[in-house]
Amino acid sequence: MDFSLTDEQRMLQDGLRRLLTSGGTWDAVAEMGVIGMLLPEEKGGYGGAGSDLMVVFEEIGRAGSDLPLIDTGVLGAGLLAAAGQDVDDVLAGGARIALAHAEPGSRYDLAHVETRAEENVDGWRLTGRKSVVVDAPNATRLLVTARPEDHAPIALFEVDPKALDLRGYPLTGGGEAAEIALDATPATLLWADADAMLADTHARATLAISAEALGLMESIRALTVDYLRTRKQFGRPIGKFQVLQHRMADLLIEIEQARSAVVNLAGHIDTPDRDRHVAATKNLVGEVARLVVEDSIQMHGGIGVTEEYDLGRLAKRLSMVDHRFGDTLHHLERFIELSA
């Protein structure tokens, strides 16, 4: 399996890194064609391979950006394209999409959907609650999952965000989310049996956030190495002390192990045993992320938790990676189940 980047991927990587370093906005990222890189050609994009997602989201993580590319580009555009909907407005950056799928008490179970859909002479109406809907306060399009009856397949609907009274709040790792209450809310049916497409888009979203975590780890590593070289104690840089050298070496090994796992998942994202690789990678990335956050802050001392220093912001964002699309324990159990 060849994991080397193509010329196009290298050009995108370099351009995206420069753009994000200079404070690239949503419009600038969309104009660069980044969203199209997340979808295969048959779904309106020009990329969509696992390596494409890894390139894009590692750079997003490296910059510590909270642009909602996972929500609009992977989940939103991916679901719309799978449902046969036009995604031209999304690719051009004219639309931001939020997916309202998780519900109170659902944890990370994709099949846990209690929101009800009822059809009458006026069309479909949805009733239920959705929680932690990322980027909902800024979304121009809102996708909602619901069931017409208890044991029916999950259906995918679109709801006008303006018809809802959203209760938004900031997220610890950056960005915003909202709690959504649906009470006979008018909706448009997009797809009647969305279970498979939800599993597919969430697997790709897990790859994306794992790659983002990898980029965050690299930025935190660079900050920590620089601090160890410049911070002096007893007349010499603290990076000269052997105990810190050993800890930094251990940290580098763990980050490289996480990189290998993400590369492996990128290569298996379209294979039959995809889900087992998803579980293994997300579990490992979560474990390494926790180690990177704890060790980097400890090696920095008190400065590591100040708001003025980049490490505090990056560490928060990296910590929150474990809480999207399944935490370490969830994926450990899932890996055991799939392996058995």
Image (spheres, helix red, strand yellow):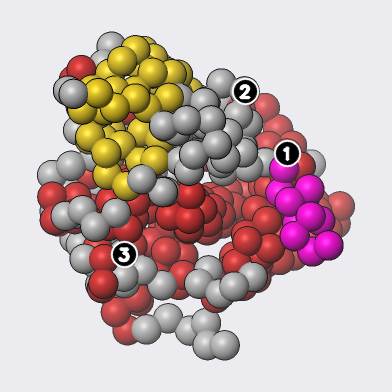
Q: Amino acid at mark 1?
A: Glu
Observer-nearest of 295 and 126: 126
- In primary-sequence order, the first of circles 2 and 3 is 3
* Residue depth check, mark 3 versus mark 1: number of the one nearer the observer: 3
Label 3 belongs to which residue?
39
Q: Which residues lie in the magenta part?
A: 330-340
Question: Left or right of 55: which side holds 93?
Answer: left
Look at 55% across and 36% down and name the residue there. Answer: 151
Label 1 belongs to which residue?
294
Measure the alpha-carbon separation of dots 3 and 1: 35 Å
Disc tally is 3
- Quick check: is 339 in the magenta stretch? yes
Quarter holding residue 279: bottom right
Observer-nearest of 102 and 187: 187
Observer-nearest of 253 and 45: 45
Question: Left or right of 238: which side holds 321?
Answer: left
Give the main secondary structure, helix, strand or loop, of the magenta stretch. helix
Observer able to see residue 197: yes
Look at 70% across and 32% down and name the residue there. Answer: 301
Look at 67% across and 27% down and name the residue there. Answer: 302
Q: Amino acid at mark 3?
A: Leu
Neighbourhood count class around disc 3 (C-alpha, 10 Å): few under 14, some 14–19, many 20 upward = many
- In primary-sequence order, the first of circles 1 and 2 is 2
Q: Label 3's element?
A: loop
- In primary-sequence order, the first of circles 3 and 1 is 3
Look at 27% across and 39% down and name the residue there. Answer: 189
